[in-house]
C-alpha cells in the first residue's frame, strides 16, 4: 500500500509498520494484538507498555555485531601488519643500513621510531586509511539493506533517527580506532627495529628531541582522523542511499581520487583550498622545528563543514527512504 508521499509500508504482525517516514517509530497497531492479552496495555501514544525508544539497539550490541564482521577483522589485521611489513622492507632493502643521502621522509624513516611512524602515516593516509574509513562508514547501513534485515530492525521497532545515530557512532568509533592503531603500531615497530631516537626533520635535517615531538605527534594523529571526516560522511550518506555496500565504499574512495586529481590542477589557484584533500598533509608542519598550525586549522574547518552537511543530508534522506521496497 502507498501513502500520500508514494512510500510503501509493509504490514507486519501486530499491525506494526516498518518504521514511520519521520523516524518517530512504528505506527500504532489497530489489530487484535494491539492491546490483546499478553501484549501489555498500550500507552497514550499507542505503544506497548514497557517500550522505550531510547533503549532500542544499544551501542554495545551494535559494536559487537560490527566487530564480528569479517571485514572488520581483516581490515584491522591489515592495518596492524603494515608497519611490520614496512620494517621488513627497510631491513631487506639494499641501502637500509647506509646513511641517508637525502632528506625525504622515506629516507629518514629508519632514523628512529617517530621518523618511522611519520613515514608509515604519510604512505597510508592517502589511500589505506581512506579505504578503512570508507569501509566502516559505507558498509554499515547498506549491508543491512542488501541483507533485507534493515526493515526488520526498524520493525523491532527502532526509530529511524536512533538507528542511524547508533550506526554512525559505531562506524566513527571503528574509523577512529583504525586511524589511531596504525601510527601507534608503527611507533612500537619503529622502536623495536630502529630505536627511540631524536627526530630528524625532513627537508632541513634539523634534530628535535623526541620528547618535544611526542605531544605534537598526538596532534598529528588527531588531525589525520579529522581529515578523514569527509570520507566518512560521504560514505555514510551513500550507505543510506544505496543497497550496495561496494557502491557506497567505492563512491567515497572515488571522491578522494577525484579530489587529488583536481588538486594537481594549478590553474584552479586558491579554489583548490576548498577541496577536501588539499590540507591532508598539513600535519607535516607540526613536526617542523617551529611548528605551524595554520594549515591544519584550515583543514579542520573544511573537513568539519563538509562532513556536517553530508551527515545532515544522510539523516534527511533516511527519514524519507522506503525501506520495504
Image: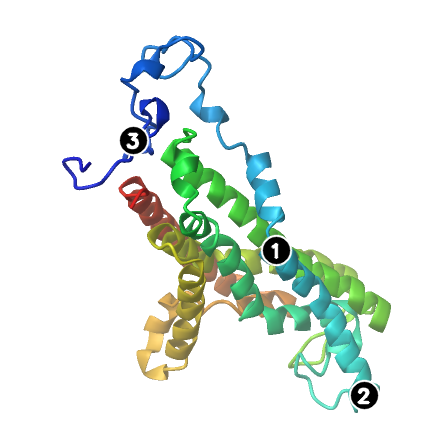
Mark 1 or mark 2: name the one nearer the start of the chain: 1
Judged left or right of residue 304, residue 46 is left
Residue sitting nearer the eye, 52 or 38: 38
Q: Say whether marks 3 and 2 touch (CB < 8 Å).
A: no
Judged left or right of residue 53, residue 67 is right
Q: Name the residue under label 2.
A: 99
Distance of label 1 from label 2 (alpha carbons)? 42 Å
Residue sitting nearer the eye, 37 or 57: 37
Point out the residue furthest to the left here: 4
Q: Is residue 219 above or below residue 86?
A: above
Spot occupied by residue 176 in the image (x, y as percentages of width and height): 58, 52
- The residue lying at 64 percent from left, 60 percent from top is 74
Q: Is mark 3 on a helix, strand or loop?
A: loop
Spot occupied by residue 242 in the image (x, y as percentages of width and height): 35, 55
Mark 3 or mark 2: name the one nearer the start of the chain: 3
Distance of label 1 from label 3 (alpha carbons)? 33 Å
Spot occupied by residue 110 in the image (x, y as percentages of width and height): 78, 77
Q: Which of the labelled discs sits on residue 20, or is there none? A: none
- The residue lying at 61 percent from left, 65 percent from top is 286
Judged left or right of residue 195, residue 176 is left
Q: Mark 1 points at which residue?
A: 70
- The residue lying at 55 percent from left, 35 percent from top is 59
Residue 46, located in which quarter of the rendered image? Answer: top left
Q: Is mark 1 on a helix, strand or loop?
A: helix
Q: In this view, does 71 lie above or below 123?
A: above
Q: What element carries label 2?
A: loop
Between label 3 and label 2, give the one nearer the viewer: 3
- The image's colouring method is rainbow
Between label 1 and label 2, give the one nearer the viewer: 1
> Taking the image as drawn, is residue 92 in sight?
yes
Mark 1 or mark 3: name the one nearer the start of the chain: 3
Q: Mark 3 points at which residue?
A: 11
Amino acid at each position: 500500500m502507498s501513502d500520500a508521499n508514494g512510500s510503501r509500508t509493509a504490514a507486519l504482525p501486530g499491525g506494526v509498520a516498518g518504521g514511520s517516514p519521520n523516524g518517530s517509530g512504528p505506527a500504532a497497531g489497530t489489530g487484535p494484538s494491539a492491546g490483546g492479552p499478553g501484549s501489555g496495555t498500550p500507552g497514550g501514544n499507542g505503544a506497548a507498555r514497557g517500550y522505550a525508544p531510547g533503549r532500542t539497539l544499544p551501542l554495545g550490541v551494535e559494536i559487537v555485531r560490527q566487530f564480528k564482521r569479517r571485514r572488520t577483522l581483516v581490515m584491522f589485521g591489515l592495518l596492524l601488519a603494515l608497519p611490520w611489513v614496512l620494517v621488513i622492507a627497510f631491513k631487506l632493502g639494499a641501502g637500509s643500513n647506509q646513511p641517508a643521502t637525502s632528506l625525504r621522509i622515506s629516507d629518514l624513516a629508519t632514523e628512529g621510531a617517530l621518523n618511522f611512524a611519520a613515514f608509515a602515516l604519510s604512505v597510508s593516509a592517502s589511500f589505506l586509511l581512506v579505504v578503512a574509513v570508507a569501509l566502516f562508514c559505507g558498509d554499515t547501513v547498506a549491508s543491512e539493506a542488501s541483507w533485507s534485515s534493515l526493515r526488520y530492525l526498524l520493525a523491532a521497532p527502532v526509530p529511524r533517527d536512533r538507528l542511524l545515530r547508533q550506526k554512525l557512532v559505531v562506524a566513527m568509533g571503528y574509523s577512529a580506532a583504525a586511524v589511531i592503531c596504525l601510527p601507534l603500531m608503527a611507533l612500537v615497530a619503529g622502536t623495536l627495529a630502529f630505536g627511540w631516537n631524536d627526530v630528524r626533520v625532513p627537508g632541513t635535517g634539523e634534530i628535535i628531541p623526541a620528547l618535544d615531538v611526542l605531544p605534537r605527534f598526538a596532534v598529528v594523529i588527531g588531525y589525520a582522523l579529522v581529515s578523514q571526516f569527509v570520507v566518512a560522511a560521504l560514505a555514510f550518506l551513500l550507505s543510506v542511499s544505496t543497497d550496495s555496500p561496494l557502491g557506497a565504499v567505492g563512491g567515497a574512495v572515488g571522491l578522494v581520487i577525484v579530489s587529488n586529481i583536481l588538486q594537481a590542477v594549478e590553474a584552479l589557484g586558491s579554489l583548490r583550498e576548498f577541496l577536501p584533500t588539499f590540507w591532508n598533509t598539513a600535519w607535516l608542519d607540526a613536526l617542523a622545528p617551529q611548528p605551524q598550525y595554520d594549515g591544519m586549522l584550515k583543514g579542520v574547518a573544511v573537513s568539519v563543514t563538509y562532513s556536517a552537511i553530508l551527515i545532515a543530508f544522510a539523516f534527511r534522506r533516511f527519514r524519507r527512504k522506503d525501506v520495504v521496497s
